[in-house]
Image: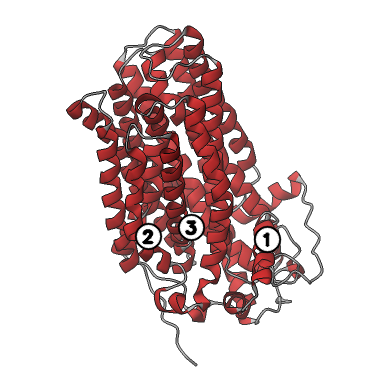
Amino acid sequence: MKTMTIRKPGTLNYLAYGSGDFLGAGTMALTSAWLLYFYTTFCGLSPIEATSIFALARVVDAVASPLMGYLTDNFGATRLGKRFGRRKFFILTGIPLVFTYSLMWISDMSYVWYLLTYLLFEVVYTSILVPYETLVPEMTDDFRQKTKFSGARIALAQLSAILAAFLPGVLLSWFGKDNPLSFFYASLVFSMICAMVLTLVWFFTWERPVEKKSATALKAETQKLTLRQSLTRLKIELTSTLRVRIFRQHIGMYLGGYIAQDVFNAVFTYYVVFVLMQSATLASNLMGAMAIMQFIAVIGMIPLCIRFGPAPSYRIVVVLFGLSALSYGLLWFAGLNDVFSLLLLISAVAGLGRGGINYVPWNIYTYISDVDEVITGQRREGIFAGIMTLTRKASQAGAVMLVGIMMQLSGFVAGSGTQSETVSHTILAILCVGTLMVLSAGFFISLRFRLNLATHQILREETEKMRAAGGVVPEAVSPQARATVEMLAGLPYESLWGNNNIGYLNRHKPAAMPLRRTAASAESSSTTLTS
C-alpha cells in the first residue's frame, strides 16, 4: 500500500501565504479609504459619478467572481492546470498584472478612463484572489493549522492596512495636500509589494495531493463537458452553495462585519475634514492608529477563536467596533472636536474591533469546504471563494454607492473646502447609525453559528470514515458524532456524502429534507459538544 506523505507547514509557509493578502486587504484598504475622496477631490467627479463606477464594476464582477471560482475548481484537468496547479497557475499569471492598480490613481482623466481602469483591476483582482483564498483548505485539514494560516493572513493584511492608512498622509505632507501624485505613488508602492508577495505565495504554498481526494472529487475535477453542460454546471454549483446552511450563516456574519467597515471607511475622512473640521492628514494618522490596533487584535484572536470558537469571539469584537462608532458621534456632540487624545483612544478601540471582525470570517471560510465535502463528497473551495469575493465586492460597492447618493442628496459640493451643516449631520449619521445597524445584523446571525474546535474535530473524523468507505455513509456512528455532523451539515446523516441533490454531480438524486432543530435542542447539543 502506497504511503502518503503529508506536508507540515512551517513558519515560512504561514508567512508566505499570509503575505499574499497585501493584494486583497492592502489595495482594498487604500481603495475604500481614499478612492472616493480622490475621485471627488482631484478628478472632478461628483459623488454619484464616482460611486457609479463601483456599482458598474459589480455588474462585471457578478460574472467574473463565480466564473473564476468555477474555473479554478475545474482547471486541474487542463494541460496548464496539471503543470502549474489548478489554483497556482492564476497566482503566477497575476504577478505582472497587479501593476494595473496604479492606472486607477492618475488624476485629471475622463470618467471613461476611471471606469475602464477600475473594471480592469477588478478582473485582475478576482483572477488572483479567488484561487488564493482556496489554498488553506488545499494545504491542510487541521483546525489549528487553518487557524494559524488565517491568523498569518489577516495579521499581515493588517500590516498592509497600516501602510494604506499612513502612506497617503506621509506623501501628502511631502508633496502638498493638494497634490494628487501622492495617491499615485502610494498605489505604485502597493503594486510593487503585491508582485513580490505573490511570488512568495507561488514558491511556498501547495495544493491538495491527489491521494487525499475522494473518487467523487476527482470525477468532478476531470469530467469533460460541452459548453452548454459547463454553463449548466456553473449555474447549479453557484445556487447550491446557498443551500449549505453553515455557508449562509457565514456569509451573514461576513457581510455584517465588512459592510459596516465599508460604510465607516467611506465617510471617515469626510467626518474628520467636514464634521470635526480637521485635516485629511489627521484622518490618515487616525486610520493608521486603527490599523496598528487591528494588527494587535488579530494576534489576540487566534487563541481566542481556538479557545471559545469563532462566533463568541466575533460578537466580542462587533460590540467593540459598535461602541467606538457611537463614541465618534458623542465626541462631536460634546464639542470635543480637537481633543486628539480622545480621538486616538476611540480609534484604537475601533481598531481592536475591526481587526477581530476582519479575522473571524476568513478563519471560518477555511472550514466551509470541510462541511461541504461531508454533504457533497466533493472539494469545492473555488466556488465558495467566488461567491465570497462576489458578495464582498458587491456589498462594498453597494455601501459606497449608497453613501455617495446620501451625501449628494444632502447637498455635498465636490471640490469645496467647506460643506453645509446638513452635509455634516448626514456624514455623522452614516458614520454612527449606519455602521451600528449593519453590525447588529451580523451579531444576531452569529448566535446560530456552531462550528468550533470540538465540532470540527468530530466532523474530520466522520469525513475520514466516509472517504475510507468510498462514498458509502457508515452505519456505525455514535450519537454524539451523528448530532454534531447533522448540526453542521443541516441534513440527516444518511443523506450525506452525496446522497442528496446538492451540486451538479448529485443533481439527479433525491432531495434530502433539511433538519428542523429547535433552539432548545441546539443548545443541548452545543452543551454536550463543548463539555
In the image, 68: left or right of 8?
right
Q: Is residue 513 visible?
A: yes
Residue located at (62% from left, 56% from top): 529
Q: CA distance from mark 2 to mark 1?
A: 26 Å
Closest to the observer, 280 or 496: 280
Residue located at (68% from left, 60% from top): 235
Total labels: the figure holds 3
Of the numbered discs 3 and 2, the one sitting upstream in the chain is: 2
Q: Which image quadrant is residue 324 in?
A: top left
> Which secondary structure, mark 3?
helix
Residue 130: numbered disc? 3
Quick one: which residue is furthest to the bottom in this view? Answer: 1
According to the image, label 1 marks what residue? 235
> Which secondary structure, mark 2?
helix
Closest to the observer, 457 or 197: 197
Asked if residue 385 is positioned above or below residue 220 in the image, the reply reads: above
Q: Is residue 158 visible?
A: no
According to the image, label 2 marks what residue? 94
Q: Residues within 10 Å of mark 2 (few under 14, many from 20)?
A: many
Residue 410 on image: x %, y %: 54, 15
Q: Are marks 1 and 3 in contact (CB under 8 Å)?
A: no
Quick one: which residue is furthest to the left in this view? Answer: 174
Closest to the observer, 271 or 482: 271
Residue located at (41% from left, 49% from top): 24
| Residue type of the residue flagged with mark 2 | Gly
Residue 460: numbered disc? none
